Image (cartoon, grey):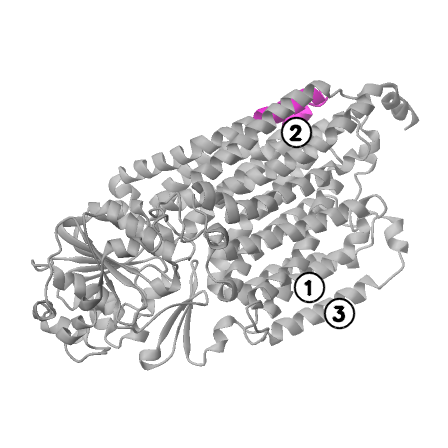
């Protein structure tokens, strides 16, 4: 030890240099974490536009993103051992190259995703939508697109750890946690900045350019600073570091990797469950999802900082009781998400969301502790440990989204994910600690603490309830996409998806079909309904006696058709009926079929995440390709749930896509029925329109009232036609809705400052 210390002291430049640049490393990782989060958010959205708004596709994108991070972490760790072990300068320059390559992804990935979409469209039947072949091909292309760039992202941890270690910085055995705090802090800033500022201000592509520019700046700064970094010779003496490689909690040393895999799996799996649990209280808007992620990251930052503060004075074995608390904190959101827990007021969602902070903070404490315990500052070992943690983060969302949630529901899925933590807690407190300090530490009995925690958790689970239990009469179906609840009686029946009220038995859903079909001077030969809902529009279109296709993203929704309509089996068995489980936009993109009438009823509210993909000019361009020469496109916009800017944005997108448009405000003032076509839409009286309805359609039209005959029913709508100029005048500065600028989803700047891009 003394020899090694003297060698380090003899190289003054090696001791002094890090003091000037080490804070730069922290800053680098703050910015790098910021960019990484921005890329993940934007790439998921671009992939949705190219490959479909399905849970499977989103899971593939996130899995490939995490796989690249894990591969990069492991590969860079090997690289530091074999190539960069004695050169801090070289390690810094490799880091610079990695950041530069990541920056290039801001330009390349959008192009690659669009190219993949084109390739799939030209694969014919081999790439049929929603088949296993489609997901295999799409998954391969997404992997080719994302993994190389994400590998460079993942490599940054071991590379900068190598710089710190090789420069003989005191305390380098905890360099991972130092960089981890910075990275998570940057991700937190990226979450807030992208959701609340950047995407609304500069769009998705502009946000990528911001991130790419920051990566390029990091690369240049790192390359410049590398000239001031001098390696210290004493790091070639690994004896001191190896002496610290001891067991944790008295468990076999290899169990640390198992713990890292488990924390990654449980943490990311819980995040998927929390989204399902808290959507009824927070809503299905992007800010709700950003809020969950921001709270998760903020709590992780505090937990990681707490670990850094305690690491020098507390041995790792003292953290054994923390696993009992982590297991308990995993089930606390189960209690807080209980619908029978009356928190009251507008702050209900926020208060419930805060329940995840304890778990996230403690996970943020334990994850860097485990990596530091395994690696003791060695970049190679840290790369392996972090890769294992990321592997768990890949598996967690897949297990939660495709198995636990469909099978058990949100409450029991959270319970199932907490079980491994209780097992680890039991092992940690029952095994003999590795360090004498941990054995002799005074305080509460860890075994008693574990027993108390277990009892509390059992009570929480036993007395909590699933959200759907607040409905006395209900039918609940779950799948990998959502939890769907059918409830109510008579015309008061409702459809809820993840706790969000989608629709009820309303005459407007019949107007959506009967009005465009009646406006046609030539009888329609076929029709398409996008968004199945209760099946009312699908049923109304079938009443015209034409082949009708209905598309819905959520498998469980059409399965509840019978709950809302007693004659549902008759309609489903009709040779004219076809129900497809698919993303409506991708269904059209992958089809060559044309339709005389296309009806779209986007899911409410207008601010719902992803809803702009059914309101944008790009979507309307897709619709045009699938309309017959005199076809009519009908889209519903729930005006009373949106704002004037979104109304204008949708109107402008339609005006830029179709030469002929008519707009009618619904009789209940709830929204606007837009009719668009490439051919003129002649004015017709209510009596003429009513005369065009077949008898079955006429009966269907007045089934829910409020009038008793079709002519009177049409009279409720026709006098309320709106001029497009009047609609646009509500907010003329609002831009047309585009995929790159979904102003309906991102609206805080507009709401607070009346600002537009």
Whether residue 88 is in magenta: the answer is yes
Q: Residue under label 1, please give it.
A: 328
* Inter-mark Cα distance, 3 to 2: 43 Å
User: Which stretch appears magenta?
Assistant: 79-98
Which element type, helix, strand or loop, lies under badge 2? helix
Q: Residue under label 3, please give it.
A: 452
Query: Could you say which disc has been placed on residue 159 in the image?
Result: 2
Q: Is residue 674 visible?
A: yes
Q: Looking at the image, how many numbered discs can be counted on the residues?
A: 3
Instruction: Give the mark, 3 or 1, whose residue is nearer the N terminus.
Output: 1
Q: Position of residue 157 (x, y in %)?
A: 65, 34
Which element type, helix, strand or loop, lies under badge 1? helix
Between 491 and 333, the one nearer to me in the picture: 491
Q: Residue at x 27, y 45 (%)?
A: 589
Q: Residue at x 74, y 41 (%)?
A: 372
The answer to which image quadrant residue 358 occupies is bottom right
| Left or right of 478 on screen, residue 154 | right
Category of crowding for the residue at label 2, using alpha-carbon neighbours closer than 10 angstroms: few (below 14), some (14–19), many (at least 20): many
Instruction: Give the mark, 1 or 2, whose residue is nearer the N terminus.
Output: 2
């Amino acid at each position: 030890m003394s020899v090694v210390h003297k060698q380090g002291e003899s190289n003054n430049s090696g001791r002094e240099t890090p003091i000037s640049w080490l804070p730069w490393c922290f800053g680098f990782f703050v910015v790098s974490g910021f960019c990484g989060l921005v890329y993940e958010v934007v790439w998921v959205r671009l992939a949705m536009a190219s490959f479909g708004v399905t849970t499977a596709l989103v899971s593939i994108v996130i899995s490939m993103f995490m796989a690249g991070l894990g591969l990069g972490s492991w590969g860079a760790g090997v690289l530091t051992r074999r190539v960069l072990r004695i050169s801090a300068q070289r390690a810094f320059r490799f880091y610079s190259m990695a950041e530069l390559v990541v920056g290039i992804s801001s330009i390349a990935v959008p192009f690659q995703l669009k190219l993949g979409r084109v390739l799939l469209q030209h694969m014919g039947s081999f790439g049929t939508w929603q088949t296993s072949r489609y997901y295999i091909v799409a998954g391969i292309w997404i992997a080719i697109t994302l993994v190389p760039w994400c590998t460079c992202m993942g490599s940054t941890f071991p590379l900068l750890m190598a710089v710190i270690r090789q420069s003989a910085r005191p305390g380098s055995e905890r360099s991972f946690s130092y960089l981890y705090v910075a990275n998570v802090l940057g991700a937190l800033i990226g979450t807030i900045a992208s959701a609340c500022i950047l995407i609304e201000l500069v769009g998705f592509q502009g946000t990528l350019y911001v991130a790419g520019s920051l990566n390029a700046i990091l690369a240049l700064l790192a390359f410049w600073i590398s000239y001031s970094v001098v390696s210290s010779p004493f790091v070639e003496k690994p004896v001191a570091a190896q002496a610290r490689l001891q067991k944790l909690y008295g468990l076999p040393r290899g169990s640390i990797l198992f713990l890292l895999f488990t924390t990654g799996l449980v943490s990311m799996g819980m995040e998927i469950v929390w989204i399902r649990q808290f959507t009824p209280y927070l809503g299905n808007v992007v800010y709700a999802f950003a809020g969950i992620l921001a709270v998760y990251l903020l709590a992780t930052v505090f937990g990681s900082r707490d670990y850094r503060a305690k690491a020098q004075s507390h041995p790792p074995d003292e953290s054994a009781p923390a696993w009992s608390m982590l297991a308990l904190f995993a089930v606390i959101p189960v209690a807080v998400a209980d619908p029978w827990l009356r928190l009251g007021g507008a702050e209900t969602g926020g208060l419930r969301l805060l329940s995840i902070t304890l778990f996230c903070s403690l996970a943020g404490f334990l994850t860097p502790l485990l990596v530091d315990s395994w690696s003791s500052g060695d970049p190679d070992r840290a790369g392996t440990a972090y890769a294992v943690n990321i592997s768990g983060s890949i598996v967690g969302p897949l297990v939660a989204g495709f198995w636990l949630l469909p099978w058990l529901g949100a409450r029991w899925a959270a319970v199932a994910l907490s079980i491994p933590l209780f097992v680890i807690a039991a092992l940690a407190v029952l095994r003999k600690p590795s360090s004498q300090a941990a054995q002799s530490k005074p305080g509460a009995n860890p075994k008693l603490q574990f027993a108390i925690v277990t009892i509390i958790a059992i009570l929480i689970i036993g007395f909590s309830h699933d959200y759907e239990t607040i409905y006395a009469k209900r039918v609940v179906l779950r799948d990998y996409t959502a939890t769907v609840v059918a409830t109510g009686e008579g015309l008061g029946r409702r459809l809820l998806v993840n706790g969000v009220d989608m629709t009820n038995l309303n005459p407007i859903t019949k107007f959506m079909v009967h009005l465009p079909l009646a406006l046609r001077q030539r009888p329609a030969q076929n029709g398409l309904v996008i968004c199945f809902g209760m099946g009312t529009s699908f049923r109304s279109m079938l009443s015209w006696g034409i082949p009708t296709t209905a598309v819905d993203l959520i498998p469980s929704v059409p399965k509840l058709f019978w709950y809302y309509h007693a004659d549902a089996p008759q309609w489903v068995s009709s040779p004219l009926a076809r129900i497809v489980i698919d993303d409506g936009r991708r269904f059209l993109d992958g089809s060559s079929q044309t339709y005389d009438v296309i009806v779209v009823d986007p899911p409410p509210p207008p601010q719902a995440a992803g809803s702009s993909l059914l309101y944008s000019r790009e979507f309307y361009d897709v619709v045009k390709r699938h309309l017959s020469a005199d076809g009519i496109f009908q889209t519903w916009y729930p005006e009373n749930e949106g704002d004037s800017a979104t109304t204008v944005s949708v109107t402008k997108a339609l005006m830029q896509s179709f030469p002929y448009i008519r707009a009618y405000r619904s009789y209940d003032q709830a929204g606007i029925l837009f009719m668009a076509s490439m051919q003129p839409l002649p004015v017709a009286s209510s009596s003429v329109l009513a005369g065009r309805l077949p008898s079955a359609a006429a009966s269907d039209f007045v089934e829910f009232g409020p009038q008793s005959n079709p002519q009177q029913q049409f009279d409720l709508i026709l006098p309320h036609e709106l001029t497009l100029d009047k609609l646009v005048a509500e907010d003329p500065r609002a831009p047309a809705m585009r995929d790159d600028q979904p102003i309906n989803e991102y609206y805080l700047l507009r709401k607070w400052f009346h600002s537009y891009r």
